Amino acid sequence: MSTYPCINIHLNRITENTKNMVASCNAHNVIPTGVTKLACAYPEVGQAILNGGIKILSDSRIANLKKIRHLDAVTMLLRLPAVSEISDVIEYADISLNSEAKTLEALSQEAVKQGKEHKVILMHDLGDLREGSFYDEETLALSRKTIELPGIQLVGLGTNLACYGGVEPTSENQTRLVNLAKQIEADYGITLQYISGASSAGLNLMLDNELPNGINQLRLGASLLMGIGLNDEPVPYTRQDTFTLTSEIIEIKVKPSVPVNSTALDAFGNKPEFIDRGLRKRAICAIGKQDVDISEITPINKDVLIIGGSSDHLILDIDYCKKDYQVGSLIEFELSYGAVLQCMTSEYITKRFL
Ligand SMILES: *Cc1c(COP(=O)(O)O)cnc(C)c1O
C-alpha cells in the first residue's frame, strides 16, 4: 500500500470538539451520542469520541458496530435493522432504532434466543419523510407492541430531520415529539429514558435555548468529527480542521489549456469544455475519481486550481503558484462531508491518525 493519497485524521481535535459539545449539551440537559459512520467506525475515531466524554457510540451499519465492539461503549444501531441481519443486531447493538412491527417481532425472538434484553427506540417521522411512522396512532400501536414483546424493551422515542426532506429541527416539531412521548408514558405507564430529537442539525436550536424541555438526546456525528451542523455550517465551540487529504505530484509540465482537436467524449462519457488561457504550468496528482468526487475537494493553497481529472488522475493548474512544486511534492486539500466519507471508505486511501 502506498503512502499517498492519505487522509489525515486529527484525533485530538475530534476529542476537543466532543468535549465542547458534551459540555454544551449537558448545559441544556441533553446527553449526546457519538455517531461514527462518517469515519466508517475506525476504532481510533471511536476512542477519540469516547475520550471526549461520550458513552453511547452509534452507527448506521452493523459492519461498523462490529469494528468498535471492543471499545468501552454502549452501542446503538441508527439505521432500521434489516430482518436478514437480526442475529448480528442482537449480538452487536445494545439499542436499535425501529419502525416496523415485523422487525420488532424478529428482534424479540432473537433476543430471547440469545438470552439478551435489547433496547428499542421507536422512530416517529415529523415530516422529513425518511424513516419512522408518520401517524401518532401508528407509533402508539408500535409502542404497545414493543412493550408486550419479550426480550425487547421500549426505552425511547426518536425522530430524524434535515436528512432527506430538508426539514429543520424547530421548537414546534421537537415539542410534538415530546408530547407524543408523554402520551406513550401516560397510556402505557412507562418512563422513556431517551427522547432523541435530532442529529447535529439540532445543535443551533439547542444553543439558542429553543430546544423544548424533555428532549434529552441528540445524535452527533458531523459536529464532533467536522465541526459542522445544519446546512453544513460551522457549529459554535468546534473546529473544522479535523480531516485533510494529501496527494503526491507525479508530473509537472507546461501545456496548452485547450486539447488538440477535441472531438471525443471524456472517460466518463461527457463532452468536455475548455477555456483557452494559453500555455499553463500543470501538475498531475496520483488520485482520481475512483478515490473521491474531485468537485468535493479544495486545495488548501488557494493558488492551486483543480481543472479536471479521470479515474486515477487529478489535473491541477499551478501556473499562479508562488510555491515551487516539484515531482514528488505533496498537495493538501480540505474536504466536504461527502469527500471525507468517500476517502474513509476507499481502500486506496491511507488512513493517517494524528
Ligand atoms: C447519520 C445520522 C445521525 C448523525 O447525523 P450528523 O449530521 O452526522 O450529526 C443521526 N441520526 C441518524 C438516524 C443518522 O442516520
Image: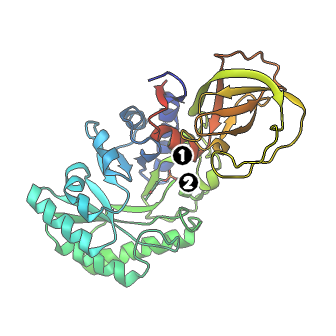
The residue that label 1 is drawn on is 223
Quadrant position of residue 313 = top right
Which residue shows up at 49% across the image and 53% down it? Answer: 28
Q: Please tell me whether mark 2 sits on a helix, a strand or a loop.
A: helix
Amino acid, disc 1: Ser
> Quick check: 102 left or right of 351?
left
Disc nearest the viewer among 2 and 1 = 1
Which mark, by number, is residue 169? none
Which residue shows up at 54% across the image and 24% down it? Answer: 4
The residue that label 2 is drawn on is 203
Residue 284, image x and y in percent? 68, 27
In the image, is the residue at mark 1 within 8 Å of ligand 1 by its beta carbon?
Answer: yes
Residue 83, image x and y in percent? 25, 65
* Along the viewing direction, whichever of 115 and 53 lies nearer the viewer: 115
Q: Is residue 68 visible?
A: no
* Along the viewing direction, whichever of 195 and 307 lies nearer the viewer: 307
Q: Is residue 218 above or below residue 214?
A: above
Q: Quadrant of the N terminus?
A: top left
Amino acid, disc 2: Leu
Q: Is residue 192 above or below residue 303?
A: below
Residue occupying the far bottom of the picture = 137
